Image (spheres, grey):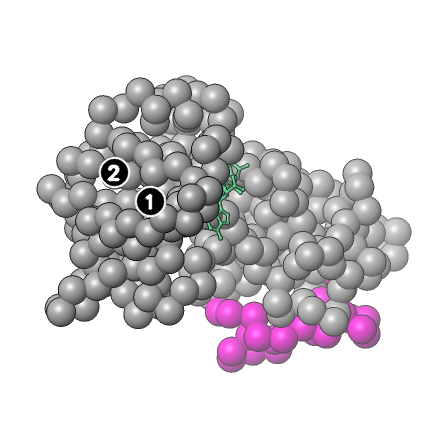
Amino acid sequence: MENLIIIGSGPAALTAAIYSSRANLNPLVIEGLESGGQLMTTTEVENYPGFRNGIMGPELIDEMRVQAERFGARFVMGNVTAVDFKQQPFIVKTDSDTFSSHSVIIATGASPRKLGIESEKRLWGHGVSSCATCDGAFFRGKEVCIVGGGDSALEEALFLTRFSPKVTVIHRRDELRASKIMRQRALEHDKIAFQWNSVIQEILGNDKNRVCGVRLKNVVTGELTDYPCEGVFIAIGHIPNTKLFEGQIDMDNGYIKIQHPYTKTNIEGVFAAGDLADHYYRQAITASAMGCKAAIDAERYLAEKNI
Ligand code: NAP
């Protein structure tokens, strides 16, 4: 029987693990198979406090994990396949084990959103990707496109200029959503071009099943244009990883509902932290802050129950 199970392995889960292990709760962290979350596919993190010269995303995750282990947090690898929050103790099942626990912190984060068109699926891994950090180096000397107008799209566009002679940002509006500093950097960059008011109708493949361009639709004029490129990066936001908890816990549009300012869900003893409960801020530091709150909420819950 566990005191506390933490599901996830990004900054929310790991901060919860640091706080709860330091409070002697001896938490069990169930890391998904894509351990570390979105920071694992991020390069330089410049805005996480405490690192004046920035830190690489995977390194930041590693630091947090080791810090949690130092205080006794235990880690098991495995995808959670089912949970039962309708009975106490709660049940958490993975591919290979079944655990029971007095409390649970859910911190499974969010995953990249896709365009959902057939050609995206067909050419995925053949020039279509959602991770410039992972795949950018394959496009050395090649022209690429990136879809989206937020911070992620511009961050990836800037990263891709290290390899690519021309990076085109395709955005469905004529105004970027990204922060002012990122907008400025991208708009002033001589290797970055923009296709405004445009959506990808089809990703074009050549006879070797490799990307050779995109068919763009101008949403204002309806005009279709074939635009050559050898890579397409999709950076259009994220979807909360909460499918597993459907029917078990209250959600709003796929995001787990919490009782602000706490991390309590509608199930007493189950807490939620990070991007799956926050569609607004979605920063590593805000996920960490929620993980801290969830650990404190869980600790107080267990103390009240004399567990
Ligand atoms: P985001 O801010 O939600 O931006 C998503 C972008 O994709 C928007 O421009 C949106 O267009 C577009 N989009 C959404 N669905 C689309 C579709 N089906 N087809 C075409 N375009 C679509 O997501 P994000 O860029 O991943 O950023 C998420 C959060 O992380 C934000 O809070 C951001 O500030 C933060 N972040 C920060 C940094 C940093 O500080 N360095 C880096 C990365 C992310 P519309 O604009 O028209 O809605």
Q: Which residue is mark 1?
A: 146
Q: Label 1, label 2: how many angstroms apart (C-alpha)?
A: 7 Å
Residue 142 lies, in percent from the top left, at: 14, 45
Left or right position of 279 against 76: right
- At 18% from the left and 39% from the top, the residue drawn is 164
Main SS, magenta region, reads strand
Asked if one can make out residue 169 in the rendered structure from this viewpoint, the answer is yes
Q: Quadrant of residue 260?
A: top right
User: What's the residue type where badge 2 is placed?
Assistant: Val
Say if the magenta span includes residue 81.
Answer: yes
Q: Which residue is mark 2?
A: 167
Mark 2 beta carbon near ligand 1 (under 8 Å): no
Q: How many marks?
A: 2
Q: Are marks 1 and 2 in contact (CB under 8 Å)?
A: yes
Secondary structure found at label 2: strand
Please tell me how crowded label 1 is: few (under 14), some (14-19), or many (20+) other residues with Cα within 10 Å: many
- At 28% from the left and 45% from the top, the residue drawn is 145
